[in-house]
Amino acid sequence: MSRVQIASIVEGDGEVQALPVLIRRVVAEIDPSVTLAVTRPFRHPAGSVQKPGGLERALSAVAEISPAHSIVILMDCDDDCPKELGPRMALRAKQSRPDLYSSVILAHREYESWFLAAAESLAGKRRLTPDLVAPETPEKIRDAKGWLSQHMQGAGRYSPTQDQTALSQWLDLNRARVKSRSFRKFWKEMEAIVRLAG
């Protein structure tokens, strides 16, 4: 039985609670025998992370407070091209902390686009309409948070701090993998972390 210790850097308040839930679910699917320790994510706004020295400072701060084997860096790529931004950020992370396995994951375009990819599994949850259907190309929708709000019953609006953790718990992982390239990337990175620990 392997033990995996994961620290993380996120940009939003919602991800602070939601990402550990998602990591635990995915790792349990990959290898149920893994003993997993996930520390509370370190919140660092994406704009400052991408600036020169920003990612490096964030990695140093996380490494000081968390005795982890791996660090997951999760950001929304918004309008940036993940194929360009991802490798640049990964190189900076590796150069900054070569002693740690750093995994850079860019949700395309937002974390919430993963919810859109498996929207059927969230139908009727957290005020979402019971007839919810995933859009054909969820990662092309610029405002995934707005899409979720538009598909809520009554006058409710989607709130990352109130809804993101619960929806991460109910998300159909297999549907998300099929329809979201960036979620498949997240899954593959979790597989790599588990392999390294084993």
Image (tube, rainbow, N blue to C red):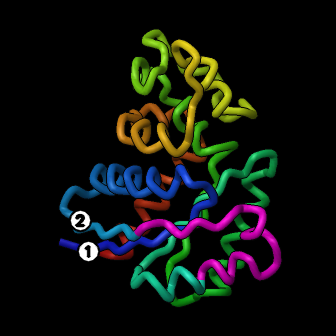
Whether the magenta-drawn stretch holds residue 55 is answered as: yes
Q: Secondary structure at mark 2?
A: loop
Q: Closest to the observer: 195 or 23?
A: 23
Q: Where the N terminus falls, by quadrant?
A: bottom left
Residue 16 point in image, percent of width and height: 49, 58
Q: Residue furthest top?
A: 131
Apparent side of residue 177 relative to residue 1 in the rendered image (left or right): right
| Residue designated by label 2 | 34
Residue at the image position 72 percent from the left and 51 percent from the top:
77
Count the labels in the image.
2
Q: Position of residue 26 (x, y in %)?
A: 36, 51
Quarter of the picture holding the C terminus: bottom left
Q: Quadrant of residue 66?
A: bottom left
Query: Magenta residues, as a range?
Result: 40-59
Q: Tell me the residue that label 1 is attached to.
A: 3
Identify the amino acid type marked 2: Val
Q: Which amino acid type corresponds to the residue marked 1 in the rendered image?
A: Arg
Q: Residue at x 45, y 50 (%)?
A: 18
Kindly check if marks 2 and 1 are in contact, taking CB atoms under 8 A apart as contact: yes
User: Residue sitting at 65 percent across and 43 percent down?
Assistant: 110
